[in-house]
Amino acid sequence: MNVPKIVAMKSKEKISMITAYDYTSARIADEAGVDIILVGDSLGMVMQGKNSTIPVSLDEMIYHAKMVKAGVKNALIVVDMPFMSYQADYVEAVKNAGKIIKETECDAVKLEGGKEFAVTINAIVSAGIPVMGHLGLTPQSINIFGSYKARGKDEREAKKILDDAKYIQEAGVFSIVLESVPKNLAKEVTESVAVPTIGIGAGVHTDGQVLVYHDMLGLFDDFKPKFVKRYAHLKKDAVEAIKTYTKEVKEEKFPTDEHSYE
């Protein structure tokens, strides 16, 4: 998979994207045939137990992206640019995007924001690095929003999201994540841009969908956003398996001769 193939899928074939953070989960997702694997800064909450994505560093993103890259043969790999790796200065943003691509050998970066980051997006793309945009609920702005509620419900905010989509398309993004926006607004955005939109809590009319590996498999249950569908309940299975293991160790039922060397 590559960027031109993803762009060509718009209006022809729905795009599947999964957020993963390590070799094993990335390998499983890749073998299952997803189109894109996102190394998300949501690892701050899912992998590190933080309250937001804000504390995640550039080096931590690179560390996880290297692991994901090792497990993937087919999917396009996109890496989130973490908080303050691109906001202060577009020159620094280009350097940090280049560092991600150079050190991880992944395919593209993703950054949050609209018109205010158009110059930054254009500079990164001009340096030869594909950029995925992200509008709607942008988690790195949680301290401004104050909550993880859906965005774009009022007319002013909806218009800004629609305008921002056009601005960042013009700046050069190859696709746009729409997070937690009303489905009718997501449909309008999708129909107004020539690049694919990928929804998370944005309804069925986007060009693709993304879920977090640990959410969809029921491994992470600290909280469950409205948009998450659990396709499995692996945490429950894991807890039961470890209970059985602990019981067998205490009762000297494990290991048996089958698991021992002579």
Image (tube, rainbow, N blue to C red):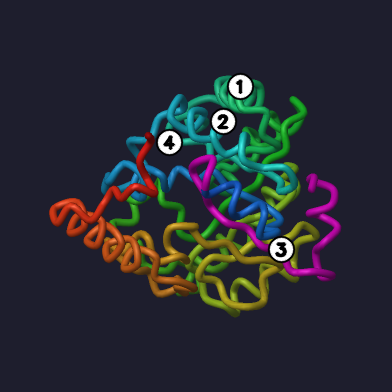
Which residue carries the number 3 mark?
15
Sequence-earlier tag: 1 or 4: 4
2 and 1 marks in contact (CB < 8 Å): yes
Closest to the observer, 185 or 240: 240
The circle on residue 83 is 4
**Gap between marks 1 and 3 measured at Cα:** 27 Å
Which residue appears at 77% of the width and 28% of the height?
A: 128
Asked if the stretch drawn in magenta spans residue 103, the answer is no
Picture quadrant of residue 123: top right
Sequence-earlier tag: 1 or 3: 3
Q: Nearer the viewer, mark 4 or mark 2?
A: 2
Horizontal arrangement in the rendering, residue 106 relative to residue 216 (left or right): right
Highlighted magenta segment, given as a residue range? 1-24
The circle on residue 103 is 1
1 and 3 marks in contact (CB < 8 Å): no
Closest to the observer, 81 or 213: 213
Which residue appears at 42% of the width and 63% of the height?
A: 215
Sequence-earlier tag: 3 or 4: 3
The circle on residue 66 is 2
